[in-house]
Amino acid sequence: MDSKALINAVKTIVDEKNISEDIIYEGLSLALATAYKKNFDSKTNVLVDINRETGDIKVYSYLVVVKEIDEGSETTDEEGNIVKIPPEINIDAQILLKDAQKIKADAKIGDTIQVEVTPKDFGRVAAGTAKQVLTQKIREAEKNSIIAEFNGKEFENMVGMVAMEDARNFYIDLGRTRGILPKSEIIPDEEIQMGSSIKVYITKVESSTKGPLIMLSRKNYGFVKRLFEQEIPEIINGTIEIYQVVREPGIRCKVAVYSNNDKVDPIGACIGEKGSRIAGILKELGNERVDLVLYSENDEEFIKNALAPAKDVIVNITDPENKQALAIVTDDNLSLAIGKKGSNIKLASRLTHYHIEIKSLSQINEEGNK
C-alpha cells in the first residue's frame, strides 16, 4: 500500500463507514509505532507522524535530555533543580545534554527533543500494518453500526431466515448479522425448518468480543404482545391498548385489552370478522390457545373475565390487602376454570395479580351444611 493508496483507503472508510478520520489516523500511528519497536528492536519512545495530505510516514524518537544517563525517576538540571523523568521513559530514551545540543543548540536538562529515525525499508512494514489497522477499523465500524441499528429493535419482533443449527441453538439471519435463538426459547413442540422464514422477538442486544450479540425468543410474552400490535390496526393507532400478556408457551396465553373508545369493542376488534384478524396470530403460535380478556378496573370483574372460558363465575375479594380472591363456579365450569394442568387458573392469577382460589357450588354447599 503506497502513500496515495493509504490516503484513498482512509477517505473511503471515513465516507462509507462514518468513522472519524482522527480515530483512524490515531489508530494507524499507534500501530505503526508498535510495529517499529518490534521490527527494529527499539526501546525508545517513538511517535509516528502520517501526513494526511501526502500519506508520507515518518518515525520520530523522543529523547529526554538528562545530566547523566540514569535508570531512576528523576535528574537534576544545571542549577541543581530536580527534574522528573516520566516513568515510561527508559534508559534508552535518555540523551546527554552535550549530545542533545548537537541536535538542538538550545536544549536544556528536562527538555524533550525528537529525532527522525524512519528506517529506509519501513514502507514494507507500514503497508502490512496499515492494512491490518484499516481492516480492524472497518470491522469495528460495522460492529458498532449493527449494535446501533439493533439497539432500536430490542424488544421488537423481526422476520429472519433459519440459517444454521447446533445442539443448543438456531442461528437466524437478520440481514446484516445473525441472531441466536436458543432451543430453550422456541415454542414447545414446534418444528423449525432450515432455510425457512421465522418471526422472532429480540430480547437482548449487546457487544461482545466476537461481535454483536443478538438474543432471540419465541417463548417470551413480548412476542405475543408484538404480534397483536402488528396485526390489529386499532392497537397500532392507540384506540385499543394491551393491559398485559401472560403465557405458558405452547399451552395457553391470556391477553388483557381495553378500549379508549366506548364505540369500539376491544375483543371483537382483535378477533376480526370471522376471526380474520387473530388468524395470523394463532397460526404463528401453533397449538397455543389465546384467550382475549376484557380488562376492568374493578378487580372482581377483571378476575371474572380472566377466568374465561369458564362462565357464570362469582368472585369475592376475600383479602384486598394481600390480593386474595375466591371464585365460585358451577360444577360443569370447574374444569374450564382450572384448565389443563391448572394453566387457566395460574394465568388468571398472574394476569390479575391475585391469588385466586376456585370452588364449585357443590363444594360451597357441602361446606355450608357442615
Image (spheres, rainbow, N blue to C red):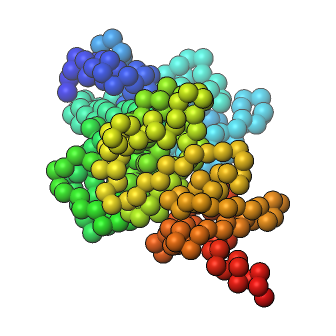
Image x and y of residue 257, in percent: 55, 42
Where 172 falls versus 123 (above or below)?
Answer: below
Q: How many marks?
A: 0
Please state which of residues 33 and 186 is positioned toward the viewer in this rendering. Answer: 186
Q: Is residue 37 visible?
A: no
Does 14 appear above or below 164?
above
Residue sitting at x 42%, y 34%: 232
Q: Residue at x 33, y 60 (%)?
A: 287
Residue 78 locus on image (x, y percent): 72, 29
242 left or right, relative to 180: right
Task: Determine the image quadrant of residue 97.
Answer: top right
Where residue 174 appears, x then y in whole percent?
29, 41
Q: Nearer the viewer, residue 336 or 293?
A: 336
Q: Is residue 272 visible?
A: yes
Q: Single out the residue that lies furthest toward the top.
A: 53
Residue ranking furthest to the left = 195
**Left or right of 346 in this view: 132:** left
Q: Is residue 244 left or right of residue 226?
A: right
Q: Nearer the viewer, residue 36 or 253?
A: 253
Q: Residue 18 lies in what quarter of the image? A: top left
Quadrant housing the N terminus: top left
Q: Where is residue 225 in the image (x, y as percent from the top left)?
A: 47, 45
Q: What is the residue that sits farthest to the bottom in this orientation?
A: 370
68 versus 3 height, above or below: below
Q: Quadrant of the C terminus?
A: bottom right
Residue drawn at x 62%, y 74% is 360
